[in-house]
């Protein structure tokens, strides 16, 4: 609870408004959005319901607010400086775009490897199923042709 209160108070002070007020004024809405974004980063295990209850909202309002944060930040640069201060205070590591791109590439490789494994597994099952039949020879010929064609393709 202390972390929530400290972050709420810091945002309220910096923006000059009480973000716990139940109003739709832009500054307050942006402040709450920053609060939700920061809390999800600082305490990843916190639920949307917990965040919502802190402001007497429902979880759908929190989801919407989280989705809108980047837009609010683009329109109000002060939000980014407040967010950076909060993250620095709570030692939250922010990943650079380069680090994020590297993570995405690594995840894409893992996904590709899983898909290839599933294809190979299914082919093995098919070969076992067709063992000793004419279909087995036909399937082996097709796979050999496929391999020959693809081994000649050069990837840039």
Image (tube, helix red, strand yellow):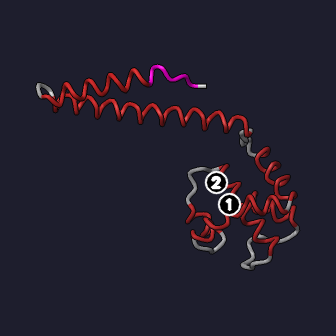
Quadrant of the frame with the C terminus: top right
Nearer to me, 12 or 136: 136
Image-based side of 33 in relation to 123, left or right: right
Q: Is residue 153 magenta?
A: yes
Task: Identify the residue shown where x is 82% and y is 70%.
Answer: 27
Q: Which residue is mark 1?
A: 36
Give the answer, above or below, for where 140 lies relative to 97.
above
Q: Is residue 61 above or below residue 114?
A: below
Q: Which mark is residue 40?
A: 2
Question: What residue appears at the point 74 percent right and 45 percent down from the top-left corner?
Answer: 90
Q: Main secondary structure of the magenta part?
A: loop
Residue 74, percent across and down?
81, 58
Q: Secondary structure at mark 1?
A: helix
Q: Which residues are magenta?
A: 150-155
Tell me which residue sits at (58%, 70%) in the image: 60
In three-dimensional space, the C-alpha distance between marks 2 and 1, rounded to whole angstroms, equals: 6 Å
Q: Residue at x 27, y 24 (%)?
A: 141
Residue 117 badge: none
- The location of residue 108, given as percent across then percent down, is 54, 36
Q: Are marks 2 and 1 in contact (CB under 8 Å)?
A: yes
Residue density around tag 2, few if under 14, some if 14–19, many if 20 or more, within 10 Å? some
């Amino acid at each position: 609870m202390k972390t929530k209160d400290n972050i709420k108070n810091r945002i309220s002070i910096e923006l000059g408004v009480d973000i716990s007020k139940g109003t739709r004024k832009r500054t307050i809405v942006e402040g709450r959005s920053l609060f939700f974004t920061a809390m999800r980063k600082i305490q990843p295990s916190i639920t949307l319901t917990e965040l919502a209850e802190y402001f007497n909202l429902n979880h759908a309002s929190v989801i919407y607010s989280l989705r809108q944060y980047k837009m609010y930040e683009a329109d109000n640069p002060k939000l980014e400086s407040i967010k950076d201060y909060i993250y620095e205070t709570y030692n939250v590591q922010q990943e650079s775009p380069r680090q994020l791109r590297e993570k995405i590439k690594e995840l894409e490789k893992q996904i590709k490897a899983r898909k290839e494994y599933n294809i190979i597994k299914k082919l093995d099952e098919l070969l076992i199923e067709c063992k000793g039949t004419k279909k087995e020879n036909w399937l082996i010929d097709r796979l050999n042709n496929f391999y020959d064609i693809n081994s000649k393709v050069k990837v840039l």
